[in-house]
Image: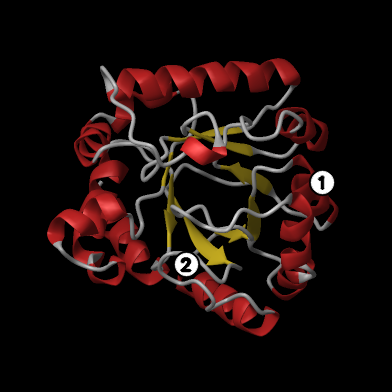
Amino acid sequence: MLDLSTPVLMGILNLTPDSFSDGGKFNNEKNALLQTEKMVTEGAKIVDIGPQSTRPNAKFLSAEEEIKRLGNIISTIKKEFPEVLISLDTFWAETVKFGYNESIDMVNDISAGQYDENLFPTVAETGLPYIVMHVNPTYDTMHEKIQFEDITLSVNKFLLDKAQELLKLGVKDIILDPGFGFGKTVEDQYKLLDEVEFLGFGNYPLLIGISRKSFIYKPLGKSPLEINEETQKLHRKVLEKGAKILRVHDVKEAKKTVDEFLKSN
């Protein structure tokens, strides 16, 4: 379905009124389609559709509310942009079922199956590729800073344990996401960036999502929209360490980084 011999860009499409940097911009069908067209034109191979914000203190949505917010947007994007792969950002099994019926191509779950016990079995039933992310065990604690003895060892064990659970259920295509921005100190996140090539021991593709994250902009005293240069330097770093998918808001800038990386390798 997806050739990862060269890095791929996943563009973020938030259908939310309350996401931290673009809330309310794309939560109607017309704007969502325009943003999808922009991202696809700029080089996104995947569009990650998120009906629920996971920023600190965001409004918590049920699966029913997520499905209502999604409406016809998945099938409409599929019709308008048949070449693009659609990833659905949800931790609810019912939302996954809805997305599957609308022809999504993969599931991007920030909870690693921890917030809905039916999520893993549902993903297995669909046969869809699945992105497993490192995160704290409950929705209410997802942003609580944890003190890790060794962040890389802890994240690696968590992801590999989850991968084993998924494999036993029959999920074949698993992508690992270290979970930048979720329950980790600034220092731990930079340590994780330094050691990201060890995650999964090279057995699974690695997705990195650092776009507009507070661990980059807050220490610099900047806003999420003012850190493109710093973000692209970190993107280049993780590409050199083997990252296969970059999840980004700014596709054009990330595409330039990927192209420069490929030219030099």
Out of 265 and 59, give the one closest to the viewer. 59
Q: Residue 43 has which mark?
A: 2
Say few, some or many: other residues with alpha carbon within 10 Å of mark 2 (under 14 / 14 to 19 / 20 or more).
Answer: some
Residue at (64%, 17%) from the top-left corner?
165
Against 46, is 77 above or below? Answer: below
Q: Which residue corresponds to mark 1?
A: 97
Where is residue 51, by image quadrant? bottom right
Residue at (70%, 34%) from the top-left corner?
116
Out of 90 and 37, give the one closest to the viewer. 90
Q: Amino acid at mark 2?
A: Gly
Q: CA distance from mark 2 to mark 1?
A: 28 Å
In-image side of 36 versus 143 (left or right):
right
Q: Name the spot of residue 123 as percent of width and height, x first.
A: 74, 35
Q: Residue 2 has which mark?
A: none
Of marks 2 and 1, the one in the foreground:
1
Label 1: element kind: helix
The disc, 2 or 1, on the residue closer to the chain's N-terminal end is: 2
Q: Name the spot of residue 156 as percent of width and height, x first.
A: 40, 21
Q: Name the spot of residue 68 as percent of width and height, x first.
A: 78, 64
Q: Amino acid at mark 1?
A: Lys
In-image side of 9 versus 35 (left or right):
left
Say few, some or many: other residues with alpha carbon within 10 Å of mark 1 (under 14 / 14 to 19 / 20 or more).
Answer: some
